[in-house]
Amino acid sequence: MTGTLYGVGVGPGDPELMTVKAYRRLKEADVIAYPKKGRQSKSYAEQIIDAYFAPEEKRRLGLHFPMTKDPAVLEPKWNEAVDAIWAELAAGRDVAFVTEGDPLLYSTFIHLMRVMEQRYPEAPIEVIPGVSSANAAAARLRWPLADGDETVVIVPARDDYEAMKAALLRHDCVVFFKVAKVIDLLLDLLRELDLLQRAAVITKVTSGEEVVWNVEELAGASLEYLTLMVVRK
């Protein structure tokens, strides 16, 4: 029988925020796959599951995804990763692909699943949802994401002042992901809209490396990739 590919969300950082179902799927899986940026680097998702599974306890499959948008570089690597997983599935082994947060929210698993469906449509796939960093940040701050008729939106922060401004003007709460590269733009925007006191910035929320920043002191700061901003009007 063909094994099943599981997309498993392991939460935002705190291993205790992994769901019972996610833990069970990982425990039952024959192989745990994970994305890694470099040949020797340990992924954030892999660090989370280390709290429950020793590296030698279960076969692990590290998949290298280059940090580039060049299709000529990316396509062969995606195909290579999918082929590696399919080799396990075809041998009857279940593979759990772990990702921080939720597998279907700005996750590597989304494209992996699409390529798998295209190349090997017979492969069984199941998604195990996880606690996203947006939910975790709201809990950490004790700020409601939405109440009553309020609206909330999750926005990938980018270098587009007017688009970021429109999101803030149209919604009661905005969660900006990936803010590191455009933090100064967002700070200028918050000042213009008089929302500086209504914003919070957190890196690696709920993890042992969590940092809740003083927003007013972030101008020119160098932030890690896993940093988000919550603005609650």
Image: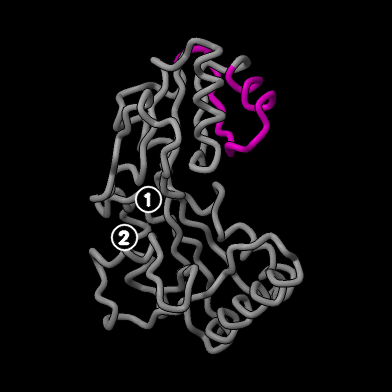
State yes or no: residue 125 in magenta.
no
Q: What is the crowding at mark 1: few (fewer than 14 residues within 10 Å), some, or many (at least 20)?
A: many
* Secondary structure category for the residue under label 2: helix
Which of 110/62 is in front? 62
Q: Position of residue 5 (x, y in %)?
A: 53, 70
Disc 1 + disc 2, Cβ < 8 Å: yes
Residue underneath mark 2: 48
- How much space separates mark 1 and mark 2, taking CA atoms? 8 Å
Q: Quadrant of residue 230?
A: top left
- Residue 143 at x, y percent in the picture: 35, 22
Left or right: residue 83 versus residue 145 is right
- Quadrant position of the N terminus in the picture: bottom right
Q: Residue furthest bottom?
A: 91
Would you say 209 lies left or right of 132 here?
A: left
Q: Residue 26, percent across and down?
A: 36, 68
Name the mark on residue 89.
none
**Relative height, residue 140 to residue 97 (above, below):** above
First in sequence: mark 1 or mark 2?
1
Amino acid under label 1? Gly
Is 22 rendered above or below residue 147?
A: below
> In this view of the protein, which residue sits in the foreground, 177 or 179?
179
Residues shaded magenta = 147-168
Please give the name of the residue rendered at 64% of the width and 75% of the height, measured from the top-left corner: 77
Q: Nearer the viewer, residue 110 or 224?
A: 224
Task: Give the side of residue 103 with respect to residue 112, left or right.
Answer: left
Can you say whether 26 is above or below 170 in the image?
below
Q: Amino acid at mark 2?
A: Ile
- Residue beneath disc 1: 11
Residue lying at 73% horizontally and 75% vertically, measured from the top left: 119
Outermost residue to the front: 220
